[in-house]
Image (spheres, grey):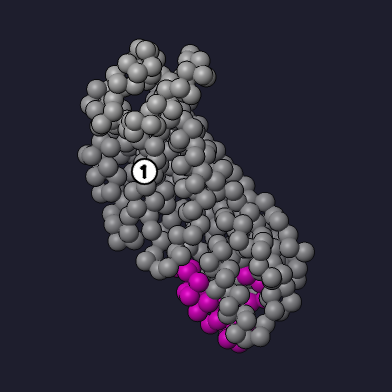
Amino acid sequence: MANLKQIAAELSLSVTTVSRALKDGPEVHPLTIARVKEVALRVGYVPDHHGRALRTGRTLTLTAVLPMETSEHLSDLAKLPLIEGMTLAARQAGYSLSIYSTTPDDDPVASVQQLLQARSADGLIITRMVSGDPRVKLLLDRRIPFVAFGRTDLDIAYPYVDIDNEQIAYNAARRLLDKGCRRVALQLLVPKDQASAMRLSGYEKAMAEAGISVDQSLIGHGTFTMESSADWFDRLLASSDPPTGLACANELGLLGALHALGRRGLVPGRDVHIVARDNTRLARFLPAKIDVQSVDMADVGHKLIELLESRIADPLGPVATVLLEGRFDSAE
C-alpha cells in the first residue's frame, strides 16, 4: 500500500509537505496540493487512521449516537438531513463522522460507556435527551468532548444545540386556534424525552391563553410512524367530539393523519386544519392545504459539529449553546 514517503519521493517533496498538502494546509501552495492529491489518488493512498491514533491519541473521527425510533420502515426519515449536515461539516473540519445507532431497547448510558471504552472517537454527539439525563454528567466527569442535540433539566453547564420545541408547539396551537379550532389534537413522540415535554408545555400554554381546558384524549404519545399516526387519528375522528385541528410532530405523523382523513372523505384545511413540523421539506410538496413549520435539520447538523470541534480544540473554553426556532411556511 502506498505511503507518504513514496508520494514524497515521486514528487521530490518532504513527507511533512505531502502530509500538510493532503490536509489542505494553508501553508502549502495550491498547485502543490493539487499535485500531491493527484499522485495520492493514482497510487491509491489511504490514510492510516489507526496508526495516527496510536501516535497522537486522536482518531480524527466524531461519533453521533442516533437512536432508532422504531424498527418500522421509514421511521428515521427525519434524521437524513441531520446526518447530511453533520457529515459535510465534519469533512470540512477534517474529521470523519461515524453513526452509532441504538435500538429502542438499548440502555443509553451503557451505549455511551461502550463508545468510551472503544476510544474510537475524539468527541461525541448525544441525542434524545431525557429529564436528568445521566449521560451529561458521565461525559463531563470523564472530560470527554461532547455536544447534546437537545436539552435536559440538569442545573449544570454543557454544550447543546436544540430546537425550540415549546415555541413550535405553541405557535402551532395558536395558528389552529386562530382558525377557529377549539378541539386541537397534539402529536407527541417518545413520552420520556425532553422534546415531547417541551411540546406539551407550549401546547398547554396556548390552550390556557385561549381559555380552553386541555382534553387529554386529544394528546397522542407514540413513535408516530405513518401507520400508528393513521390509526390514532382515525380513532379521534371516530369519536363523538372529533378534533377540528391537529399539530403534527413530523412528516410521518402528517402522512398518517392525511391517510386517516382520506379514508373518511374529509379534506384538510376544510374539515380539519393541520399544522405540521417539517424536517425534510416533504410537506410543502403534498397536494393538501396545511400549514408547515420548517426546521433546517442540515443546519442543525452543521452547528452540532461546529460546537463539538470547538470543544475538542478548547475543552476548558466557554460552554456554547444554540437554540433554533421553526418558521412558518404557510401553504395558504
Query: Residue 199's image quarter?
Result: bottom right
What amino acid type should be assigned to the residue bearing mark 1? Answer: Ser
Residue 280 drawn at (x, y percent): 57, 56
**Farthest residue, direction right:** 332
In the rendered image, the vertical position of residue 214 relative to residue 107, given as above or below: below
- The residue positioned 37% from the left and 20% from the top of the image is 19
Indicate the secondary structure of the residue bearing disc 1.
strand
Residue 135 drawn at (x, y percent): 33, 44
- The residue positioned 37% from the left and 66% from the top of the image is 71
In the rendered image, the vertical position of residue 228 relative to residue 332, given as above or below: below
Which residue bears the numbered disc 1? 98
- The residue positioned 48% from the left and 68% from the top of the image is 224
Mark yes or no: residue 311 visible. Answer: no
Q: Is residue 275 left or right of residue 312?
A: right
Mark yes or no: residue 330 visible. Answer: yes
User: Magenta stretch: residue 252 in it?
Assistant: no
In the rendered image, the vertical position of residue 240 relative to residue 184, given as above or below: below
Point out the image quarter for the N terminus. top left
User: Magenta stretch: residue 226 in it?
Assistant: yes
Q: Residues within 10 Å of mark 1 (few under 14, many from 20)?
A: some
Residue 120 drawn at (x, y percent): 28, 37
Q: Nearer the viewer, residue 57 or 18?
A: 18
Count every numbered label the image shows and give the total: 1
Q: Which residues are magenta?
A: 222-246
Point out the image quarter for the C terminus. bottom right
Q: Is residue 140 left or right of residue 78?
A: left
In the rendered image, the vertical position of residue 254 relative to residue 206, given as above or below: below
Q: Nearer the viewer, residue 266 or 26?
A: 26
- The residue positioned 72% from the left and 69% from the top of the image is 289
Residue 276 drawn at (x, y percent): 62, 63
